[in-house]
Structure formats: C-alpha cells, structure tokens
Amino acid sequence: MYGKGLRSLSIATVAAMALALALVFFYAPLEAEEGFLQKIFYIHVPLAIVALCGFVIGGLLAIQHLRTRDPKWDFRSYVAIHMSLIFALGALITGSIWARGSWGHWWVWSEPTLVSFLIVFLLYATYQPLRFSIEDPERQSRYASVFAITAGAFVPLNFIAVRLSSAYLHPRVLGSASNLPGPMRLTFLVSLGAISLLFVTLCKYELAAKHTRAQVRALRRRLAGEGVELPRRGRSAAPSATTIAAGRSGA
Amino acid sequence: MSARVGVSATVGLRRTVAALLRKELLVELRTLQSVPGMSLFAVTTFVVFHFALNRNTVDGDLAAGILWVTLLFAAVLGVNRVFVADAEQGGFDGFLLAPVDRSAMLIAKVLTLLAYLVVLELVAVPAFALLLLGASLGPGLAELIATLALGDVGIAVIGTLVGALAVHTSARDLFGPLLALPLLVPIVIGGSRASSPLLSVTHSAGAQGRWLLTLGLYDLVFGLIAFALFDFLLED
C-alpha cells in the first residue's frame, strides 16, 4: 500500500541529489567573503526549511487524525515528525559548523533563526518519549496528535518571538533566496527540491517498512493461532503494529 | 462535544466553571498542596541565586531574568500537580459523567492556575524586592503588574494544556517541565524584555508596548489552541 512507486521515487531522488551536489560544487560561484565554506548553505538551509515544513505537516496530519479517528493519519503524522527530527538534527549540526567557520564560534546566540530552531528541536525531542510513556495505543495516538498540533502551531509563533527578541540582526550572508545572484539561486532551488524529494522518499520508506512489519506480525499471529502471545522485541515509540494493520481495514 | 447530550440537558457553562473552580480552590485550601510549596520554592531559589551569582543586589536584565526564571520554575511545580488529583481519585470520571460542556474544565483549571500564580507572585515579588533587587520597585510597579498578569495568563493556559497531556504518561513529573519549558520560551522573552527596564536602577524607560503586545497575542493564540484541543485529552 505504501510501497507503490517507491522504486521510481528513489531513482528520482538519487538523480536530484546528484544534480544538486554537482551544481553546488561545480556550478555555483564561490562567495566573495566566505569562499568555499559558504557552500554548506546549500545543504543547511534546505534541511532546515524541509524540517520545519515537516513539523507543520505533521501537525496538519494530526488534525486529520483527530477529525477522522483513522489511525493511518496518526501513523503518517508520526513518520513526518520522526523524519523531520532527523533532518532538524542535520540542520543544527550543519548550522553549527557554518557558524564556527564564519563567526569563529560553534554557537551564536545573536542568530535568531538558529536559536528558534534549537527551541523547536528541544520541543519536538520530547515527542517520541511522550509517545513511549503512554501505554494505551488509542490514547497514545490521540495525545500525540494533540502534541503535534500544538507544536506545529508553536513553530511559526516561536520564530516570530525569537526574531523580535534580537535587537539587531546579525549581518547575514544570504538571507533568503530572493536576493541571491542567479546561479546561486538556481543551485539553492535545486538543492531545496532535492532535499524535499529525499524527505518524501525516506518518509515513504519508513511508512512502507513499518506497515509491512505490522502486516507480517498480524499474519504470524494468525498462523500461531488465537490467544498465543508472540514475543515482543522491545518497545517502540511508533504507533503500535496492531493499529497500523487495523487502520487499513478501517477498524 | 456538548452536542452529544443535547443543549437543553447541559448546565450553563458559567455555573459549571464556577462549581469546578470552587472545588479546586477548596481542595487547595484544605490540602495546601501547591501554593505554599510554589511560594517557598521561589523564595528559596532567590537565596540560591544570591549565592550562585555571589551578588547582594541585582538589577536590569539580570533581575528580570532571575525573576522570570524563578516564577517559571515555581509555576511548573504547580502545573505538575494541577491534574494529579483528578487522574488518581476519579475526578476525570466524575466530570465526564456529568452532562456539562467539557471546555468548562479547561477554563476552571486555567483560572485555578491563574489564582495560584497570583498568590505566588504576591509572595515572590516582594521577597525578590527585599532580598535581591537593587532598584526600587515603586516607579514601574503598575507596568510590572501588567507584564506579570499577561505572562501569568500564558503560563496558566500552556500549563493546563501540558498538565493534561502529561498526567496520563508514566513519567508525568518529567513531561510537565519538558513540554512546558520550550512552549514558554516566548513568554520568558516577552516578560523579561518588558520588565528589565522596570527593574533597572536608572529606571530609564517604561515597559515597551511591543513586548506586552507580544505577550498578549501569544496568550490569545495559545488560548484558542488549548480551547480547540482540550476536549481530545478528556475522552476515554
């Protein structure tokens, strides 16, 4: 169900990533002040944008879950947030490297975007432990959705508040795509597209893998007969296998 | 959610809120579980700050930061307890059986937390002025009260939402603060920026309107979010 089109999507992602990296290293001109270091911008900023959009999408999927009560929406919301967390970690690390390279410090408090990003990351870092600590699967998905919506709304609010708090803006190398010179903008947009594709592909892989595992479990349980408890291999924060498998038949 | 039982059967929202609020305050008055602890915690924290910073007086940015951080941590103590009795002694079940609007519980809990915070600040702010503050509180007092009030509303709303989320987890004392602190960062930003000129020795300027506006808008938005989502935390 989730595996459809995965092969062509994967090929497209690999091609787009290759194209983006080729543009970054061979086409985009060297920035006058920062030189080669500035090229991390083409990875860092798309990672951050995709992660933030992923968080917001996770919130929208959670709204859908609370409206329809279909566990599949919770499952999708979980995957979107899980993947966004990984991308956000990547954005924080690349941002830190960039800050070290251009300003000499691993962490710069005067850069509001980086600071808001850290706050958002710290909030979302509690998402999985929160799921993990609620036993009942139905309640777990409901509470996780409430969290996802609250946090999703918090993302833009937090950015506004932190931006207000910095009295002066740090001299920014390249603020947004609009004031970039042509070749740089093209490279940036291609990288943004490639990273977005990567996000979608990885989400699809995780959806397919978790769904397949749930189905295998359900089949194995049927094979073993009623009332037989299969051994569990450790708990997970992901939506439980039974709800994922049941969600398909609309139970 | 009230549609389920029919509009005619529901008791008026105001009466429900009043009854719930009365119950909360009565329980607190009889057990004294939250407010004295929160107040004592705040005063002790000021003493800790005195030794940790090795300073006899503070003012300006530093004073605003200490005041807001202390109030925030003391508030989190209250947030952690606000739903515990309901979860452990069947308060949720009793409330869900009653034919009343479920938002009443949100409103009542927000008002309860707000009352706790006001009492906390009646103790903590004079104690702060006495123990640590180098500047005089007098000239900016009205503005400080306005800032604290706006901050309290935000803390109460977010605290109620987070408290309800955390109370059914297996590590509720941990999740309350972990969820609440990032969500309260904008309140700290607005509150401390607005109150730092009020707490400076020179008393250079009044509270900047834009910080009060930020606080107010944040309160409003989170009030709406909590109102929309709280029902989903009560179902069973």
Image: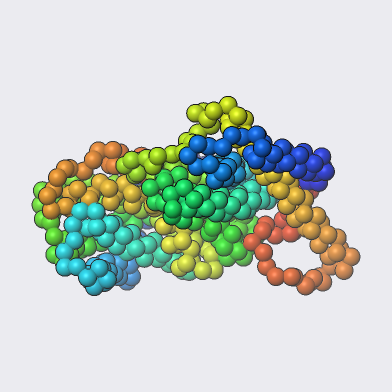
Q: Is residue B130 above or below residue A40?
A: below
Picture quadrant of residue B56: bottom left
**From the viewer's perspective, is A98 left or right of A249?**
left
The x, y position of residue A218, in whole percent, is: 82, 60
Q: Is residue B79 left or right of residue A52?
A: left
- Asked whether the viewer can see residue B216, the reply is no
Residue B122: name its quadrant: bottom left
Q: Residue at x 24, y 54 (%)?
A: B61
Residue at position x 33%, y 67% in the image: B34
x and y percentages locating residue B7 in the rendered image:
48, 40
Image quarter (top left, top right, bottom left or bottom right) of the C terminus of chain B = bottom right
What scheme was used to colour the molecule?
A: rainbow
Q: Nearer the viewer, residue A74 or A69?
A: A74
Counting from the top left corner in percent of width and height, residue B43 is at 23, 68
In the rendered picture of this protein, how many numbered marks are placed on residues? 0
Residue at the image position 70 percent from the left and 47 percent from the top: A203
Q: Residue at x 44, y 53 (%)?
A: A104
Which of A220/A227 is in front? A220
Along the line of sight, the residue nearer the viewer: B85 or A21:
A21
- Identity of the residue furthest to the right in this view: A223
Q: Is residue B178 visible?
A: yes
Is residue B81 left or right of A117 when viewed as pictured?
Answer: left
The spot of residue B210 in percent (x, y) is 28, 38
